[in-house]
Image (tube, helix red, strand yellow):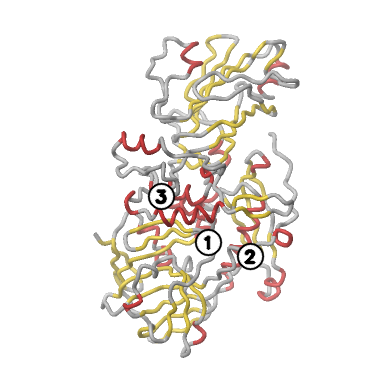
């Protein structure tokens, strides 16, 4: 099937794939990915207007701009709603919105039971995630951090009886908890089963991670407030959660379903997935999270057999590489920690996920994958012999597209995953050359470490300063497995030396006259992903005080 859209004064046809529309960012959103129409350019005869695209990318730099761009009439961008604090709190709704948890998150859930018919107890049940979770690592109520005596799914869990533990006093336990991982075979909650024998055994919340709390009222108003919080009638627990186990193509013991409509095959496949492998929290690895969302039928729904898992595996290796911090510790290069809700568009969520590793969403010749920003060698040199006919070349950008100061908001793991203002990156040299300060405020929805925020700010600013883009036709003999959307190529022309440099392939296709290949290229710099010296680049940043209101 073909997808038809209007552009450059005529109708254009491209193959209609499940994800083709969000991938054509450089065409459908002028000034986005490709950045054409800048302040300066050169056209030599021009290129063929009609092209059947075989490959295209949506880039992470464009994704940051897209989700933070103010929307008409709203004054805010989509980033405000992605992994927002309100999506991580407790809610009481007749039809709660499904949400998934990835990585490490402090979150509550949607109330599915609340009962005070058995004094002195109050029962509260929360639906945490519409996907299986890996573990509960902590519980927090009001200003109290609760140490657990032990942890296991589907059995009662109690506070540890230690000095200062508010919830155990004189041998009297005033809090009982139980947690369900969200397995498809999940049984009825043990607390509810024991205390509410009339509940049907089918009351199991299968496939949904849950938490149940049995609170014992305090002996006085003052005691109640010490236990459950000031000014509340119902306790408001939050949990430190390790989110969904993910498919990792590097692990031969795991497999991915070939047909999501086959419930048995899906359950068997997902039972092999892991959150932690060889000591690495692969459930946080940005490329694996992106691939999970790309292929899931409730998300992007990219066909299972057409995902390039070899590329996903290479991206995961890069994302998991340790990056040095100034204090001598290290962190994984690119992670995703957060909550996504099913009322948000898959495109918006995928754009937000791409900001985690400044990545690309690539479709090429009917195959799709995500690709982090990482150093790559050029797979092809486009010289004068390969150039075919005319070309369009932009070698400058409008001042409105430039950035010389970047501010950020993110969800800090050191501040209980509250949204806070992050560091500010200021380039005084660029301010001087631009003649004014040009500030871009951004929100990075899935970052949880200010040092990762600072590194992304640096990559984002430096990538936006790359000014050149080129659209040209090249001889068909250049077509091969290596020349694909998302690849790096070198242009080397003695006739037009201003073109020379390294470029990312943004789109590749066959002109409608079949005269060769048409490629759209965006300037790249291989050093940007690795240009990070913590002694120089990591800011001295003081986290704001924790908001306990």
Where residue 219 sits: x, y (%)?
69, 11
Q: Give the residue drawn at x 31%, y 45%.
A: 258
Give the vertical position of 269 relative to 53 (above or below).
above
Residue sitting at x 32%, y 65%: 5
Q: Estimate the spatial distance between the alpha carbons at disc 1 and disc 2, rounded to whole Å.
A: 12 Å
Marks 2 and 3 sit apart, C-alpha to C-alpha, by 29 Å
Counting residues from the start of the chain, the first of labels 3 and 1 encountered is: 3
Is 317 situated left or right of 159 in this image? left
Marks 1,2: beta carbons within 8 A: no
Mark whose residue sits in front, 2 or 3: 2
Q: Which mark is residue 396?
A: none
Badge 2 element? loop
* Residue placed under numbered mark 1 in the picture: 373
Relative height, residue 259 to residue 361 (above, below): above
Q: Nearer the viewer, mark 3 or mark 1?
A: 1
N-terminal of the pair, mark 2 or mark 3, is 3
Q: Nearer the viewer, residue 330 or 472?
A: 330
Q: Are marks 3 and 1 in contact (CB under 8 Å)?
A: no
SS under mark 3: helix
| Residue at point 66%, 25% (across, down) | 147
Q: Which residue is mark 2?
A: 531
Could you tell me residue 320's position as x and y percent?
56, 51
Earlier residue among tags 1 and 2:
1
x, y percent for residue 53: 33, 67
Q: Which residue is denoted by mark 3 in the rendering?
A: 294
Picture quadrant of residue 396: bottom right
Quadrant of image for the C terminus? top right
* Crowding near the residue tagged with mark 2, few <14, some 14–19, many ≥20 C-alpha atoms within 10 Å: few
Mark 3 neighbour class, 10 Å CA radius: few under 14, some 14 to 19, many 20 or more: many
Give the side of residue 278 with respect to residue 434, left or right: left
Classify residue 412 by image quadrant: top right
Q: Quadrant of residue 466?
A: bottom right
């Amino acid at each position: 099937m073909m997808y038809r859209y209007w552009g450059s004064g005529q109708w254009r046809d491209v193959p209609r794939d499940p994800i083709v529309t969000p991938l054509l960012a450089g065409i459908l959103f002028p000034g986005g990915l490709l950045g054409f129409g800048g302040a300066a350019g050169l056209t030599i005869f021009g290129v063929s207007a009609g092209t059947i695209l075989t490959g295209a990318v949506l880039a992470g730099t464009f994704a940051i701009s897209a989700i933070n761009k103010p929307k008409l009439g709203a004054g805010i961008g989509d980033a405000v709603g992605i992994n927002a604090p309100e999506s991580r709190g407790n809610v009481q709704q007749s039809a709660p919105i499904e949400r998934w948890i990835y990585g490490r998150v402090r979150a509550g859930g949607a109330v599915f039971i609340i009962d005070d018919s058995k004094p002195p107890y109050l029962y509260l049940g929360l639906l945490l995630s519409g996907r299986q979770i890996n573990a509960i690592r902590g519980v927090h109520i009001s200003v109290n951090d609760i140490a657990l005596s032990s942890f296991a799914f589907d059995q009662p869990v109690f506070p540890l009886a230690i000095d200062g533990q508010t919830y155990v006093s004189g041998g009297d336990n005033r809090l009982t908890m139980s947690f369900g991982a969200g397995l498809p075979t999940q049984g009825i909650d043990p607390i509810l089963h024991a205390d509410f024998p009339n509940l049907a055994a089918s009351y199991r919340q299968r496939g949904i991670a849950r938490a149940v709390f049995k609170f014992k009222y305090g002996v006085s108003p003052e005691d109640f407030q010490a236990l459950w919080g000031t000014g509340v009638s119902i306790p408001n627990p939050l949990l430190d959660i390790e989110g969904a186990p993910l498919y990792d193509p590097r692990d031969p013991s795991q497999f991915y379903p070939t047909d999501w409509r086959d419930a048995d095959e899906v359950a068997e496949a997902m039972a092999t997935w892991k959150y932690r492998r060889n000591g690495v929290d692969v459930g946080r690895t940005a490329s694996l999270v992106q691939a999970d969302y790309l292929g899931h039928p409730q998300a992007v729904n990219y066909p299972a057999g057409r995902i390039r898992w070899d590329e996903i595996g290479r991206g995961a290796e890069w994302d998991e590489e340790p990056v040095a911090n100034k204090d001598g510790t290290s962190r994984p290069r690119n992670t995703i920690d957060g909550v996504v809700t099913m009322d948000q568009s898959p495109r918006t969520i995928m754009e937000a996920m791409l900001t985690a590793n400044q990545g690309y969403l690539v479709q090429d010749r009917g195959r799709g994958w995500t690709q982090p920003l990482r150093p790559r060698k050029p797979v092809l040199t486009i010289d004068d012999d390969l150039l075919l006919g005319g070309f369009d070349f932009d070698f400058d950008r409008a001042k409105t597209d430039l950035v010389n100061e970047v501010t950020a908001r993110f969800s800090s793991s050191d501040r209980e995953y509250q949204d806070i203002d992050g560091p500010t990156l200021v380039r005084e040299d660029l301010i001087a050359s631009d003649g004014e300060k040009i500030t871009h405020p951004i929100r990075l929805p899935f970052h949880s470490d200010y040092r990762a925020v600072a590194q992304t700010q640096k990559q984002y600013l430096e990538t936006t300063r790359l000014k050149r883009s080129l659209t040209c036709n090249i001889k068909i003999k250049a077509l091969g497995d290596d020349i694909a959307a998302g690849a790096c190529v070198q242009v080397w022309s003695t006739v037009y030396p201003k073109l020379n440099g390294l470029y990312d392939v943004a789109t590749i296709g066959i002109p409608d006259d079949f005269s060769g290949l048409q490629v759209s290229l965006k300037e790249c710099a291989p050093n940007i992903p690795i240009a990070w010296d913590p002694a120089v680049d990591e800011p001295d940043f003081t986290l704001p005080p924790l908001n306990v209101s």
